[in-house]
């Protein structure tokens, strides 16, 4: 259920993962509030399982995965608005 306050809409994010930098700690998977990530079955060069995005549309651009990653192997960018016709406010 989405609650709207005027034209305020939640932001969406694009998650970028540097698989070779990841050490498979799983912090990003564990602490994501929307369960956007899961550990993959593949191995990187170091022998770890990096995360993969499983629910890209659920990302709310909280950047918690980026802040909690000890290896700086993940970052989030703001997804551009798809609806060009509507003017809307968003959080900073």
Image (cartoon, helix red, strand yellow):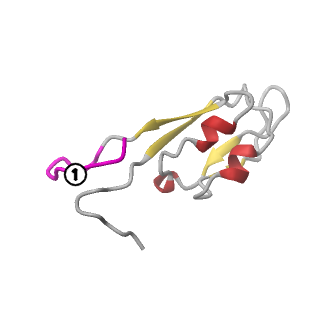
Per the rendered image, the range of residues in magenta is 81-92
66 lies left or right of 47: left
Residue placed farthest to the bottom in the image?
1
Q: Main secondary structure of the magenta part?
A: loop
Q: Residue visible at 79% across and 36% down? A: 43
55 lies left or right of 26: left
Dividing the image into 4 quarters, which one contains the N terminus? bottom left
The one of 38 and 60 positioned closer to us in this rendering: 60
Q: Residues within 10 Å of mark 1 (few under 14, many from 20)?
A: few
Q: Residue visible at 80% across and 33% down? A: 23
- Residue 40: image location, x then y, percent: 73, 47
- Residue 70: image location, x then y, percent: 74, 31
Taking 64 as reference, is 10 above or below it? below
Callout 1 secondary element: loop
Dividing the image into 4 quarters, which one contains the C terminus? top left
82 lies left or right of 52: left
- Residue 76: image location, x then y, percent: 52, 36
Q: Quadrant of residue 75?
A: top right
89 lies left or right of 31: left
- Judge whether residue 57 is colored magenta: no
Taking 21 as reference, is 37 above or below it? below
Q: Residue visible at 67% across and 27% down? A: 72
- Judge whether residue 86 is colored magenta: yes
Taking 85 as reference, is 44 above or below it? above
Q: Residue visible at 32% across and 40% down? A: 80
The one of 64 and 86 positioned closer to us in this rendering: 64
Residue placed farthest to the left in the image?
85
Taking 53 as reference, is 58 above or below it? below
The one of 68 and 5 positioned closer to us in this rendering: 5
Pointer 1 residue = 88
Labels in figure, total: 1
């Amino acid at each position: 259920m989405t609650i709207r306050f005027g034209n305020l809409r939640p932001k969406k994010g694009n998650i970028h993962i540097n698989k070779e930098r990841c050490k498979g700690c799983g912090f990003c998977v564990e602490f994501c509030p929307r369960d956007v990530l899961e550990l993959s079955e593949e191995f990187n060069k170091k022998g770890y399982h990096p995360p993969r995005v499983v629910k890209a549309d659920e990302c709310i651009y909280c950047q918690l995965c980026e802040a909690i990653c000890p290896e700086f192997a993940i970052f989030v960018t703001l997804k551009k608005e798809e609806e060009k016709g509507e003017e809307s406010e968003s959080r900073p």
